[in-house]
Image (cartoon, rainbow, N blue to C red):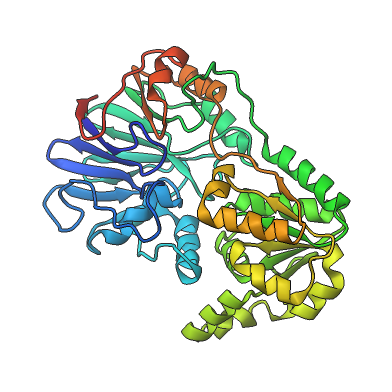
Amino acid sequence: MRVRIHRGAREIGGNCVEVEAGNARLVLDLGRPLTAGWDDQVPLPALDGLTGDPAGFCGVVLSHPHEDHYGLVRQIAASVPVYLGEAAARILREAAFFSRGLDVTPAGFLVHRRRFEVGPFRITPYLVDHSAFDAYALLVEADGQRLFYTGDLRAYGRKAALFERLVRHPPVAVDALLIEGTQVRADDTGTRSLPSEAAVEDACVATFTATPGLALAVYSPQNVDRLVTLYRAARRAGRTFVMDLYTAAVAAATGRTTIPQASWEGVRVYVPQRQRVAVLRAAAFDRVAAIRSQRVYADELRRTAGHLVLTFRGSMCAEVERIQCLTGAACIWSLWPGYLAEPAGIRLQEWLARHEIPLVDHHASGHATPQDLARLVAAFSPRRTVPIHTSAPERFAALFPRVERHADGAWWDL
């Protein structure tokens, strides 16, 4: 078996890994680089099979529904088989209606520890703890060899037990562990700690309790762990959690009755103007009908602002300003802090400053700490450890044993 990293060997995001066995090839993830703007044209990797149907090309397996792992799938031929989790496919289909997502008909679905075969490849998905719902690591076997690709994972979210189970019961005799290193820094000593999802919940409770007015929550609805965190924090603080229509659709798409739904007690749904326009243009009135009994309108937002946590994004600034519901408000930022340095983040901060609304950062990363990665490497004891999804691959040799670095575009043998 041979492997080629097309992107990700020394950058965070844009993952694409090609695996070859005999005359057959398989692609693990096909991500859009995080450095690409929304309107930038990003070429597909130089990889036969993505735009046609050559013999031996077995398709694309997506580890999880984050743009930097699936974004370039929009550009491939419809005939290319695509495999991903069933809930992930539903979530991406909902995202495609509201903003950016992916509407494909999968050739098959990933199921935790259920092995399936594609050509000569035997693939076993392992459900992992990550900020994307329905995320998997992938064990790929062919030619008597075993490659384990972690995708993105962490050990301190609401599914942390999955990481601990993987450490206790890893696959045996792994030839290469292709491991993400988002949290590995150039000066890393391997001892950094990061806030857990539980810590974010506690911090949000404190902020919601101390805020006299409306609590604005900026987060990604596809981060289902964070959706749960904000709902739980709102209830603990005695507030009602207000979803938007997109969040309600994502929650329903998970297919899990343990995920807060629009119909739950303590949940309401506000439909921002941009989403109302999207529904009108598509004549998708069933979307609004599904949440009619839970819907909250502008006058109620204004009257009850101090009792609410409102799902919020920058596109809603002028809208909530018109509603006049911002007296005593606070804004919780629950995304990667780096987004605040981008133009949209700067505009949001300027708007908040004009209204004297404090911005509070309550966020947990979706990626494992170096010390958790070290536990994973020790448990697997692979013949080699190969960095991916990292800006500091040069630090791996100081943190983990038997590290091999491979450049983008270079083939290497297992």
Residue at 62% x, 62% y is: 313
Whether residue 222 appears in this view of the structure is no
Answer left or right for 237 relative to 55.
right
Position of residue 59 in the picture relative to residue 165 (left or right): left
Q: In this view of the protein, which residue sits in the foreground, 357 or 207? A: 357
Point 80% across, 59% down: residue: 329
Residue at image location 36% in from the left, 50% down from the top: 32
Res 114 quadrant in image: top left
In the depicted structure, whether residue 295 falls above or below residue 67 = below
- Give the x, y percent position of residue 321: 72, 71
* For residue 164, side relative to residue 217 (left or right): left
Q: Position of residue 410 (x, y in %)?
A: 20, 30
Residue 382 in view of the camera: yes
Image quarter for residue 78? bottom left
Q: Position of residue 278 (x, y in %)?
A: 52, 78
Q: As displayed, is residue 176 above or below residue 288?
A: above
Quadrant for the C terminus in the image: top left
Query: Residue 132 at x, y = what percent?
Result: 53, 48
Q: Is residue 206 left or right of residue 313?
A: right
Q: Measuring 47% from the left and 38% from the top, which residue is drawn there?
A: 152
